[in-house]
Image: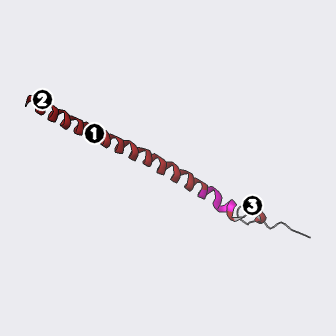
Amino acid sequence: STANIVAPSTGIDAKKLTVWNVYGTPLTNLFLWGSITYISLQVVWWKLEFAELVEETDNKVANLEKEIEILKKK
């Protein structure tokens, strides 16, 4: 006869206790939240990098416009 082995305190069938059933949900949550955090930080990084690039380009344009004005006066 095959008797179901039941975990004493949980009442869960021992045959259903696999590595995936025990650790799957926490690992999935860890992967999900880790991915969300990584992608969010990457987007913030890109926005900051773009803002810095725009500022540098604006400064270059302003310097070139000043040079043009100086050369026009000569």
x 65%, y 58%: residue: 24
Give percent across and percent down for residue 32. 56, 51
The quarter in which the N terminus is drawn is: bottom right
Question: Is residue 41 shown in magenta?
Answer: no
The residue segment tinted magenta is 20-27
* Label 2 to label 1: alpha-carbon separation: 22 Å
Q: Within the image, what quadrant is residue 74 found in?
A: top left
Label 3 belongs to which residue? 12
Q: Within the image, what quadrant is residue 10 found in?
A: bottom right
Which mark lies nearer to you, 3 or 2?
2
| Placement of 62 over or under 44, stated as above or below | above
| Placement of 71 over or under 31, stated as above or below | above
Label 1 belongs to which residue? 57
Which mark lies nearer to you, 2 or 1?
2
Give percent across and percent down for residue 42. 44, 48
Residue nearer the viewer, 56 or 24: 56
| Placement of 7 over or under 45, stated as above or below | below
In the image: residue 30, left or right of residue 71: right
Which numbered disc flags the more N-terminal residue, 2 or 1?
Answer: 1
